Image (cartoon, rainbow, N blue to C red):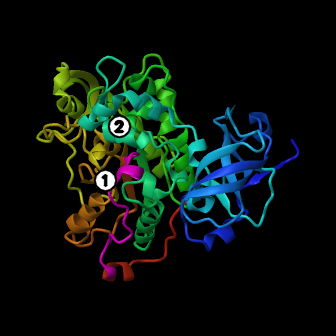
Amino acid sequence: MAAAARFVLFLLTTATFLQGESLELDGRLVRFTPAPTPGQVRPYPRCLATYLYEVEKVHRGAFRGRQIVVAKWAVWNRTALPALPSEVNTIERLKLDRFVDHPGLKTSRIVDGIRERELVLYYDPSSRPPPAVARALTPKTAELASGAVEGEAQGWLFLADELEHARTGRFWEKPWKESSCAGVSPLPALLDVQKRLRALDVNLLVVPVPTKVSIYPERLAEGLERSEAPTEYLQLLRHSGLRVLDLHPLFRDYRAHPEHELLYCAQDSHWTPQACRLAARAIYRTLEGEDPPLLQEQDLRPATRHIRGDLARMRADLALPPERLSLEEVRYPTGQNSHGYHHPGSDLVLLGDSNVAVFSDPLDGLHGPAAGLPDYLSAFRGRPVDVIASFGDGVHQARLNLYRGRSRSETGYWKNKSWVVWCFSMREFTRAAQWSTKVPVARRKLIEGAPRGRPPSDSHGPQ
């Protein structure tokens, strides 16, 4: 194959000055790039190839040119895609977007045998194979509307909102107005929070909680394989300057053990105490640069709980029996049975959604106490953490709760803080209603008076 492989960086400057508009047209194939093989584009798992069409008729959108260059996916997950255009003069109905309107594609691998540098590059979204989860959900449309979807594994349920996120696949490669409820990339908001905290001499660690289907895909549909998309997106966030702890490799390695304890409840949308304990260890290791101390027998006690999960309550029609969980509770002094939320004097803030409260809060439906993320994290550290949770919205409302409920109301709240650990469901990247850059962390006067002497440390960043 004579065509040179390269990153998609050409034509972006020209396209930036044009108004983005989707097209639908009939195109006659004039020239095509010979289909690359997975071996030719190794180590990249995916690549696009270019095709030159003569425009026969425009059905939708404004296009006045005679020819158009189109990028289509040719290799996907190290597999050559079938049915790529290869017969000159064949006419196709094409639905296209400008390539530049898919910013997540700008570093994608491309094989370009056309080399028409004066033409704006377009992209064919239909050439992208649908995510495996999307195919598995095709017969489950009615269940999605109920809020909880029954998996093929006996007794397993999945949150519909989580599956809607999973079915978007590589969501960052699509226009955010299509892939996200908020309609914007989460990155500016994440960087804004980090910037605001740095102004207070406080570090941020982002800890997205993997979706249940990303760890147990076969429980939804037999033969469904895990997706690497979550880890790839978190790597992009890390490369953008954020400290991100990716729990996917940890959880997948753990569940590979034949006798592993479940990391997610079968009938609830949340992770289990065992997952909370693993996450607490990983967070400690990231913050401190070393493994946490071993918890002794006097620190923990074995327990069994029978829970009726939120998904089981949504699907009362299934009449599922209570789910039984074996766990180890953190022991507290006499008169205290849980970690609690309000510890404003702590040097560490645990911010997030219900994942930072489940199995810790004794409130009905949260299945506590004493076996959630704050319990294990405080046990490893030997001191409590300040917990700010917002159920159902760990992105926007949780930040408002931090500002209103702590920063404004607690005098000197930020004085001794070193870390904010922001822990929320992975699905929020596409399902959150808003990713605002306008939420304050502290009053302006406090920020202006904050010390500038200690630069944020990178020595303990996630590896």
Residue 191 location in percent, x, y?
47, 65
**Amino acid type, label 2:** Cys
- Relative to residue 236, is residue 182 drawn left or right? left
- Disc 2 designates what residue? 276
Q: Main secondary structure of the magenta part?
A: loop
Q: Residue at point 67% right, 66% down?
A: 12
Q: Residue at point 36% right, 64% down?
A: 417
Asked if disc 2 and disc 1 are in contact, CB closer than 8 Å, the reply is no
Residue 218 location in percent, x, y?
44, 23
Magenta range:
425-444
Instruction: Give the answer, above or below, for where 151 lies relative to 199.
Output: above
Numbered disc 2: secondary structure: helix
Pick whichever, 18 or 66, lies toward us: 66
Instruction: Give the answer, above or below, for where 232 lies relative to 55.
Output: above
- Answer few, some or many: residues within 10 Å of disc 2's Cα (few below 14, many 20 plus, some between 14 and 19): many
Q: Is residue 426 magenta?
A: yes
**Amino acid type, label 1:** Gly
Residue 156 is drawn in which quadrant?
top left
- Mark earlier in primary sequence (2, 1): 2
Numbered disc 1: secondary structure: loop
Pick whichever, 24 or 174, lies toward us: 24
Numbered mark located on residue 394 in the image: 1
Q: Nearer the viewer, mark 2 or mark 1?
A: 1
Q: Residue at point 49% right, 20% down?
A: 223
What is the spatial separation of the Cα atoms under label 2 and label 1, in whole angstroms? 17 Å
> Looking at the rendering, in which quadrant would you find the N terminus?
top right
